[in-house]
Image: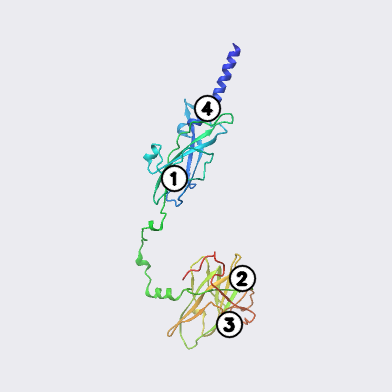
């Protein structure tokens, strides 16, 4: 009699050990946390074959069987999956995928699964869900019954073609209408058609401060109305006129327009630029000085091969009368940094 009781107890224990795992695998385990391009329910994506993913876990709505909370057993492993993608929630609710039905795929992958259905178009809505097959124990074969379907998820496509963008910019256009004076400045104070200047490539060293200077004479018989230094740098530049700081320019900012009228004087003047770059490139600058007078044509001093450059500083290097005989002629370059670097702005 005692033997029969022992056998019954052992069988009961075996059932308790096996039944929860089987029930959990077939009824409570399933895909959760569905993602598309690593986000939940993303809107307006531009990836034409988005990557789908999920986790295998416990579905809280189906976690109790017979009023008994089931613990998630260890060693659960996905062995296969099926994905459905539909164009409407109603189609998906019927367990149909008019955009994609992957069928049963033997795989334990749960992320970076490329969408493999119909070509997706701009603004498309894609409703999807997934179910999995699992291996519940090393001692048991894979379940032949799939899990429940996951809760539905969604992604939408953005505008995939240039012609799909049919909107117009809106705003208060009147607030941005350039005055005739501003329009004239835009035309005059720019760096269009200029070239970059730097130390000659064979003589310069990357990431070393570079000094640039240009001495010139401003007519003494003309009245200066204003003088604008248009300047852009690769990567940073401090500007002086006759040794006086007048402003700076940087590669991550728009083209600088520095009013240097008060720093100039009739007769000899000197422009000095200190150009820096922290990355392994030769420092370079591009720009011009435009002097406008009360009458007559403008006088323009562009950055070009008439400038002298050095990577060694000296007292008074940016003032009139400095002896720059030991300095070298600046080298003009269209693209001083290489073909992959950003281009200079047109103004």
| Percent x, y of residue 123 | 39, 50
Using the rendered view, name the quadrant where residue 323 is placed.
bottom right
| Percent x, y of residue 201 | 61, 72
Of the two numbered discs 4 and 2 on the same chain, state the one appearing first in sequence: 4
In this figure, which residue is indicated by the disc labeled 3?
320
Distance from Cα at disc 3 to Cα at disc 2: 21 Å
Of the two numbered discs 4 and 1 on the same chain, state the one appearing first in sequence: 4
Nearer the observer: mark 3 or 4; the answer is 4
| For residue 263, above or below residue 336 | below
The secondary structure type at the circle numbered 4 is: helix
Nearer the observer: mark 1 or 2; the answer is 1
Tag of residue 20 = 4
The secondary structure type at the circle numbered 1 is: loop
In this figure, which residue is indicated by the disc labeled 2?
209
Looking at the image, the residue that sits furthest to the bottom is 221
| Percent x, y of residue 55 | 51, 39
The secondary structure type at the circle numbered 3 is: loop
Quarter of the N terminus within the rendering: top right
Distance from Cα at disc 4 to Cα at disc 1: 37 Å
| Percent x, y of residue 221 | 48, 88
Neighbourhood count class around disc 1 (C-alpha, 10 Å): few under 14, some 14–19, many 20 upward: some
The secondary structure type at the circle numbered 2 is: loop
State if disc 1 and disc 4 touch (CB < 8 Å): no
Neighbourhood count class around disc 2 (C-alpha, 10 Å): few under 14, some 14–19, many 20 upward: many
Of the two numbered discs 1 and 3 on the same chain, state the one appearing first in sequence: 1
> Going 58% across and 16% down the picture, which residue do you hit?
7
Nearer the observer: mark 4 or 1; the answer is 1
Nearer the observer: mark 3 or 2; the answer is 2
Of the two numbered discs 3 and 4 on the same chain, state the one appearing first in sequence: 4
């Amino acid at each position: 009699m005692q033997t029969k009781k022992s056998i019954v107890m052992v069988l009961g224990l075996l059932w308790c050990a096996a039944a929860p795992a089987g029930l959990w695998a077939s009824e409570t385990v399933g895909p959760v946390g569905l993602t598309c391009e690593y986000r939940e329910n993303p809107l307006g994506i531009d990836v034409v074959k988005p990557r789908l993913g999920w986790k295998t876990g416990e579905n809280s709505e189906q976690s109790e069987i017979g009023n008994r909370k089931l613990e998630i057993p260890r060693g659960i492993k996905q062995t296969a999956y099926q994905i459905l993608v539909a164009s409407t929630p109603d189609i998906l609710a019927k367990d149909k995928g008019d955009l994609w039905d992957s069928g049963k795929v033997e795989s334990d992958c749960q992320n970076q699964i490329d969408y493999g259905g119909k070509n997706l178009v701009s603004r498309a809505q894609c409703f999807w869900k997934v179910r999995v097959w699992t291996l519940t124990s090393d001692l048991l074969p894979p379940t032949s019954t799939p899990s429940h379907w996951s809760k539905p998820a969604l992604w939408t496509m953005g505008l995939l073609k240039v012609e799909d963008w049919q909107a117009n910019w809106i705003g208060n256009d009147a607030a941005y209408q350039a005055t005739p004076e501003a329009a004239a400045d835009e035309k005059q104070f720019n760096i269009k058609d200029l070239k970059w200047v730097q130390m000659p490539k064979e003589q310069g060293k990357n990431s070393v401060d570079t000094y640039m200077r240009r001495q010139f004479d401003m007519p003494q018989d003309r009245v200066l109305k204003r003088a604008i230094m248009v300047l852009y740098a690769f990567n940073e530049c401090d500007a002086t006129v006759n040794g006086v700081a007048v402003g700076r320019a940087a590669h991550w900012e728009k083209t600088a327009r520095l009013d240097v009228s008060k720093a100039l004087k009739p007769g000899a003047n000197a422009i000095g630029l200190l150009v820096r770059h922290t990355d392994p490139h030769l420092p370079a600058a591009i720009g011009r000085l435009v002097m406008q007078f009360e009458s007559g044509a403008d006088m323009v001093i562009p950055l070009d091969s008439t400038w002298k450059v050095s990577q060694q500083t000296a007292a008074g290097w940016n003032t009139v009368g400095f002896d720059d005989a030991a300095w070298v002629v600046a080298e003009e370059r269209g693209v001083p940094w290489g073909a992959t670097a950003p281009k200079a702005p047109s103004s």
